[in-house]
Amino acid sequence: MRDRAFLRFTLISAVCVLLLANSYPQQQEKTFPSSYPAEWSVIFQPARALSEPANQFSFQTYLGFGPGTTTLTKGTVLLPGTMALPCDILWDRDVAIKLRDGVTIYVDVFRPAKTSAKLPAIIAWAPYGKSLPADPVAHFNKTVPASWVSGLTRFEGPDPAFWCNHGYAIINVDPRGAFKSQGDIHYWGRVDAADGYEVIEWAGRQDWSSGKVGMHGTSWLGIAQWHIAALEPPHLTALSPWGAHFYDQYRWDVCRGGIPDAGFNASITSGMTGSGNRAEAPYQMIARHSLMNPYWDDKIADMKKIRIPVYTVGSYGGDLEGFRAIASNEKWLRIHNKGEWNDQYDPVNQQDLLKFFDRYLMGVQNDWENTPRVRLTVISPDGADEVNRPETSWPLAGTEYRKFYLDAGSGKLMLEPVAEASSAKYDAETGQATFTVTFPEDTRVIGFAKLRLWIEADGAGDMDLFVTVQKPSTKDRVQWPNGRLRVSLRELDPMLSTDFQPVQSFRKNQFLSSGQIVPVDIAILPTGLLWHEGEQLVLTVAGNQLKGNAVAINKGMHVIHTGSEYESYLQLPIIPQK
């Protein structure tokens, strides 16, 4: 009897423990890699020495190692013409943070000096160097007035003078391998993101911290936010990536359209600076691995894991991809018509960003939620741009995806399918084909375009296609939408593609045989352009690169088939007049 009673007691106790455990949220311990798998054979190259002066791709001259705390007094002007510091600032220099594998990295922390309040923190993450003061004229190529920023502004990061004056701490990070931080420099991916996770959690636990942490910055500093936030650090509360050109490095950086184009990446990599460290070299990896594989998969942030408030800003192109991909219900997008640096440090935009962070990092009830979810620019080549046009979504609600059919016989884009078959042929290495349409009324093209072509390679088993959509005889201020595709990599990814944006899988080659005619879908960068009544749109398809550093594989002739069974068309996102 005692045995039965004991057994009954044990079972009841076990059930109670399970019920009690399930009544509380369980914090799962996360484990992250600190290096790439050996089988990936990731290429690293020597980093620049700390003693080398800055150049256009290294961004920052190293000013020395000096752990300690400095008080910068209100009114101090650190560099000629820059903003005087609006408050006293505590500057904790070269603070050591030990990562999960024992590697030590260094950060600088800026805090308002005369406050006992707990502070939210904003982190700036990039390997470009945190040494200060930094000359904004040199940093931003004279696009940012020196009076807009202080000498505490790291390249593309938040200005501590502005943010400390509004009750925030700024944390500038030299990530793994950068400058005096130990280890090797990594290009985004899980290792770098996991380091960011740890620094966010470190920041959230400091005795001066309110426990709320945000991130801000442009370009690399924006891209890094997608990867770090996708790991869901508990203290990360809000994001503001500006000019975050992509979250998928293969498709948007080194191999857009499946065509290796790594010249810019090589330039950035050559500027990476470290203390006897190495820098990862994606431009060499794409030369070795031209198809998607686990290494490139690691360079794709899991955007569905980003559920916190996000305010993202950019220009037309890859900057807009993140907004559409993240899962957050509290997200805002602004599309500007400026250079990214001039837009980032514009005092009006600084105040706009302050309102966002005040709402989510400070808890201020300031009606930020009433800000239009999308504010965009409609670019007019004559300079009369429509700025901050309010919208509810991206792509825009009510978009009419209109097909303009290619007619090789006339060189026109037609509103109706073309009955008679014809073809346009051009030299694959130097030639091009053009197709035009004249708009009978003012027409706004805002969103994602695509090109469906029926194509044939005469004298080759593969072909690289380059595409632009533009208006002739206009100023260079307009960045025209463009697209590209290596035809052997035409297979679409059904999970990623939509009717308005084809996305290739890039995982296997499908070479062409002699005389084979195949359909291909080419994504064209999103845009927001106004054509006036009577103005012409020109579609150009070419075998030579129209923009970038791609090395095409073309030879022989390209043949574009149109009409009858070969419905080649340009699909444009037309916005009806309001």
Image (tube, helix red, strand yellow):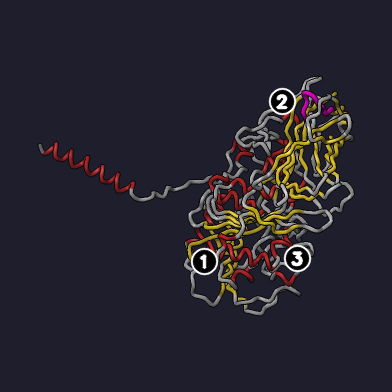
Q: Earlier in the sequence, mark 2 or mark 1?
A: 1
Image spot of residue 22 (x, y percent): 34, 46
Q: Classify mark 3: helix, strand or loop.
A: loop
* Residue at the disc numbered 3: 144
* Residue at the disc numbered 2: 510
Q: Is residue 338 on the magenta stretch?
A: no
Q: How much space separates mark 2 and mark 1, taking CA atoms? A: 56 Å
Image spot of residue 96 (x, y percent): 55, 61
Question: 102 or 306: nearer the eye?
Answer: 306
Identified by mark 2, the residue type is Gln
Discs 1, 3 touching: Cβ within 8 Å: no
Residue 49 position by quadrant = bottom right
Identified by mark 1, the residue type is Gln
- The span picked out in magenta is 559-567
Q: Classify mark 1: helix, strand or loop.
A: loop
* Residue at the disc numbered 1: 365
Q: In this view, does 561 lie to the left or right of 201?
A: right
* Quadrant of the rendering where the N terminus is positioned: top left
Look at the image and tell me whether residue 186 can be seen: no
- Mark 2 or mark 1, whichever is nearer to me: 1
Q: Classify mark 2: helix, strand or loop.
A: loop
Image spot of residue 413 (x, y percent): 83, 36
